Image: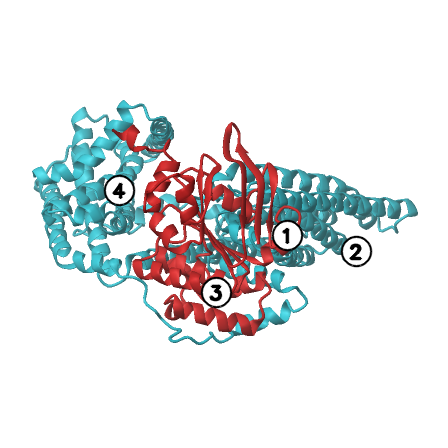
Chain colours: A cyan, B red
Amino acid sequence: MKELFILLAPRFWSLRNDIIRFERSFYKKLIFYIGLGGIFIFLITRLLSLGMAKLQNLSPDVFNLLLVKGYSLIFIIIFFIQIINGFVLALNTYYQSRELEVLFTSPVNRTSLFFSRLLETHIRASWMLIIFGIPLLVSSGLLYHAKPFYFIYSLALFLTFSIIPVNIGIGAAIFTASVFHVGKFKKFLFSGGIIAAALLLTLLRLFKPERLVTPELFANLTLFISELKAPAFILLPNRWLSEAIFNFLGKAYSMDTLIFISLLFLTSYITTVFLEMVFRRRHYRGWGLLQEGGVILKGKGPHAPRMTRFTKVFQRFTKMLEAESRMLLSKDLLCQLRDTKNIHQILILLSLIIIYLFSIASLPLNWEGYSVQLRYMISFFNLGLILIIIASLCSRLVYRAVVSEGSSLWILKTSPMTPGRYVRTKFLFFFIPLFIIGQLLTISTSFFIGIEKPMILLKSITAAVVTFSLVSMSIAFGISELRYATGDSVRDAKAGSAIQMISSVSLILFTLALEIIPIFLYFLKEAEKAAFTRKAWLMIGGVVSVLFLANLCISAISMHLSIKRYEKLQLS
Amino acid sequence: MIEIRDCTKRYGELIAVNNLSLSVKESEIFGLLGPNGAGKSTTIKMMVGLIKPDSGFIKIGGYDISLDPVNAKRIMAYVPEKGYIYEKLTAWEYLTFISGLYGLEEETFKKNALEYLEIFGLSDWKDEVIGSFSMGMKQRLLLTSAFMRNPEVIILDEPHNGLDPKGVKLLKDLLFRLRSKGTTIILSTHIIAIAEQICDKIAIINRGSVTAQGTNEDLRQYARSSDKNLEDIFLRLTSDYESPGALS
């Protein structure tokens, strides 16, 4: 027991030091989380209480049934979320935490070590209980006008209930870590999660959920919920918890209530004992696996690697460029493609683009009398949205990539590559894919909306010139934030990212303000079935010229500033 | 081969390098020796063009690093103390990238890169991403990327950091080999024994200025000392820094 206290002491001491030394960042965080959490808990509790009171007034008989079923359903959701929570947290607390090296090499009993880690995992997993548990327990207590003892009783049961899924999660993590390398598995989990989320979002949209929103179905909602087979199997802990709570609230105590309470405590105890056994048998194996260095997979002997298909294709496409630019492009491409954060962003982006295209294609544009009006209005906002997508991509990819170069910039700065070549190559690298995305979105959505070819051409030119400016602006902002830092330079440059986004949005608004004129003229022409006058042509030509000139100036200034700034950049 | 004349670099109130002048001949191993914060790294960063001097000039092979940086950089190689390398690239991709930046012929690159990868024991790791390398392996890769180009000037900032004893010995032998081929080498170090063994000439830098420079013998005479080793001369010349008197 003494060892357990020693193992937990650094956590408590750190917390105590933060409190008594008035650590500003600690207090800032504390106020932020307590404030935000407090507001959230208050709002959810209030909302639940109001909703439940309304339902109770509608039909008291059905309400009791609904309440138990609803709580049971929420508890089973919490149960499964806590399993995942425990799993992810255990990978850190039992394997990747930096202090583990010190702890595992100390002459401390492994049982004490296990329990100290277990306690830490449970404390770290407790935010779920605070955020969702408190509103659930408090609102039901308020509804039944429960005495203060109820809150202690329900909280104790809820905590006991929570121990079970977290223990299952930890056990699964220990078992998995004994088979797979924790670091790689965590990356796989994260990537898998992102891919699943992107797929789910896309599928949900393709499923057309708006078809289901028919008012007639709402009449039978209560009936539907009352018929709902919420997971209420007798051997599931969520059933034990909901029965124990509502038997108490409804003052319907019986032997069953006592059995459910005993089952909760007994199961949490048994899972802890079982978990300790799993820890003893499997943990050391996983820890050992984590300590192993990288494995040489290929490349035996001193021969030059063969040229891959990717290299061949890349070399063919970049043949006209100088070797320096080609190498910088190749390096950027490999670094960007191998950065899992970028892959995740690209996946989410792809999913959003599909959803966006599908939404535009499914718009009901054939409203009698308003069809032309609607078409041109949507076409106008569509252009704005596409430009915002390009601006966001510039902020997330271009700006981020330029700023993150800070830590390795010494390589380029000490090389004979000129600042001009550096800036131009960076521009080329980002402009081409963004230009293609912009054009694909503009042309395909215009086709779906059904506007005339000259309008599609105008929108396509606008998207191209604005993309040109947005990319050059992002590079200029990125270079102005370049620092020689070994830390997280991207995180440090968040203020610059905000300014870059504000500037981009300003440019988009300016462009849209100009675009109103030709779009309105075209709308008039279509609505009145008339031909363009010379004045109208002049106005359209004037707008396009102003657009060209403005974007040309912005791009030229941005490129010039980028080169000058890069030239003057000192890496001290 | 290298000429530094009256260079000064200030960071606000702090004078990091104060009116520093140095000259290094061809085929010479020149050591910059000094206590922490003496201005060695700032001097090196000015030489390789990472920072610009507030006054004075630096010439590498006759090219002014401020006025003609492209030509100056083309003939030199720099290995920083803690150089971040692109962790997502494999060792071979990184070397290919460097060869492209410096315009190396493909055949020369392949031959030299493979030779130095073998020398530094990285042949089996050339297709692995740099992110999985240890600190010593990264340092050896940086040295490979510098040496494979056969530069006229090599500038090394604390090159022994992170290297194991075998690596230190290997580096020493390589530096001697390169010197015999006509390469000029500048290295900064705080390990006096290394400077004493490797360097033809040494400059002792303290508080941003050169306190003394020359061969071991020159320094001994300058310090008017009969001390046999460089460590005693170094401590005598930088006596305001952690002097034995101050400790007692």
**In the displayed structure image, the side of residue A190 where residue A249 appears, left or right:** left
Residue A56 seen from this side: yes
The chain letter for the residue carrying disc 3 is B
**C-alpha separation, residue under disc 3 versus residue under disc 1:** 23 Å
Q: Earlier in the sequence, mark 4 or mark 2?
A: 4
Rendering coords of residue B232 (x, y %): 32, 41
Q: Does dot 4 land on a helix, a strand or a loop? A: helix
Discs 4 and 3 lie in a common subunit: no
Secondary structure of the residue carrying numbered label 1: strand
Q: Nearer the viewer, mark 1 or mark 4?
A: 1
Q: CA distance from mark 2 to mark 1?
A: 56 Å
Q: Are marks 3 and 1 on the same chain?
A: yes
Between label 4 and label 2, give the one nearer the viewer. 4
Residue under label 1, please give it: B63
Amino acid type of the residue that numbered disc 2 sits on in the rendered structure: Pro
Q: Could you tell me residue B13's position as x and y percent? A: 51, 27
Q: Nearer the viewer, residue A18 or A372?
A: A18
Rendered residue at 63%/56% (across/down): B71
- Quickly name the residue at label 4: A125
Foreground mark, 2 or 1, reads 1
Local crowd size for mark 2, using a 10 Å CA cut-off: few (<14), some (14–19), many (≥20)? few
Discs 3, 2 touching: Cβ within 8 Å: no
What's the residue type where badge 4 is placed? Answer: Ala
Residue A300, given in percent of the width and then of the height, sits at: 37, 75
Checking the image for residue B148, the label placed there is none
Relative placement, left or right, of A473 versus A543 is left
- Vertical arrangement, residue B72 with respect to residue A549, above or below: below
Q: Which residue is mark 3?
A: B180
Between label 4 and label 3, give the one nearer the viewer: 3
Measured in 3D between alpha carbons, the distance from the residue under mark 4 to the one under mark 2, in whole angstroms, is 58 Å
Image coordinates of residue A437 in percent, x first then y, are: 62, 57
